[in-house]
Image: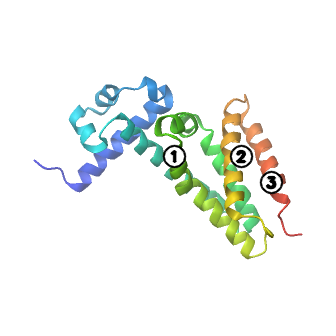
Amino acid sequence: MRKTKEETKLTIKKVLEIATLKFAEDGYANVSLEDIVQETGLTRGAIYHHFKNKKGLFASVFEEVQKEIAQTIEIEAMKSNDKWIQLINGCRAFLTAASETAHQRILLIDGPAVLGWDTFRKLDQQYAMSGLKEQLIIMNQDNSIDLKDISVEALTHSLSGAMNECALWITEKNDRHIAINEAVQVIENFMLGWKKK
């Protein structure tokens, strides 16, 4: 009997939820497809049908985490009408979400190693950097910031790279909240150089 589209969606959702937990807790190298098969109660064939292999499953998990973080950033940024505060709120939301135990290993440690740098950067640009770049362009156009001859692209990559590194640094600290506040302060000071007086 063929599954309906809704049943298929629910199956994929269940697999992704379980795989996300396993990859976050144990890391990609320590998770086997058999672990996922046992947890989901599906057959190995069903997993292969939807995700081809373990790397394909991880890529789907990585993309879901990116989407989830992008949505969180959007929600937090839009809590203010002030473009500057939106930027800072968005940066704080990224650092908070990316440094969470459930995300850090998938997003920042295993992501680049498993997917390869090119795929990692492509997905990072699609979900994280695109929103950041859009915000910087809007801020420059409405004179919240003055980039003069500065490349928006270069600034986006610099800020995104700094935040990825800060998120890794935050995960090493005993008090995440203090570390997040310190990182946000650095990012805000970094951006002050372009803020319109």
Badge 2 vs badge 1, beta-carbon distance below 8 Å: no
Between disc 2 and disc 1, the foreground one is: 1
Horizontal placement of 104 versus 13: left or right? right
Label 2: element kind = helix
State the CA–CA distance, disc 1 to disc 3: 29 Å
Residue indicated by mark 1: 118
**Toward the viewer: 157 or 128?**
157
Q: In which quarter of the image is residue 99?
A: top right
Question: Type of residue at label 3?
Answer: Glu
Badge 3 vs badge 2, beta-carbon distance below 8 Å: no
2 or 1: tag closer to the N-terminus = 1
Q: Can residue 106 be seen in this view?
A: no
**Toward the viewer: 34 or 181?**
34
3 or 2: tag closer to the N-terminus = 2
Measured from the top left, where is residue 78 in percent x and y?
64, 64
Residue indicated by mark 3: 188
Residue 7 lies, with reference to residue 79, above or below; the image says: above
Residue 62 lies, with reference to residue 131, above or below; the image says: above
Residue indicated by mark 2: 162
Question: Type of residue at label 2?
Answer: Ala
* Residue under the point 23% across and 55% down: 5
* Residue under the point 46% across and 48% down: 63
Q: In which quarter of the image is residue 150?
A: bottom right
Question: Type of residue at label 1?
Answer: Asp
User: Which residue appears farthest toward the left when viewing the image?
Assistant: 1
Horizontal placement of 174 versus 3: left or right? right
* Label 1 CA crowd tier, 10 Å (few <14, some 14–19, many 20+): few
* Residue under the point 24% across and 32% down: 44
1 or 3: tag closer to the N-terminus = 1
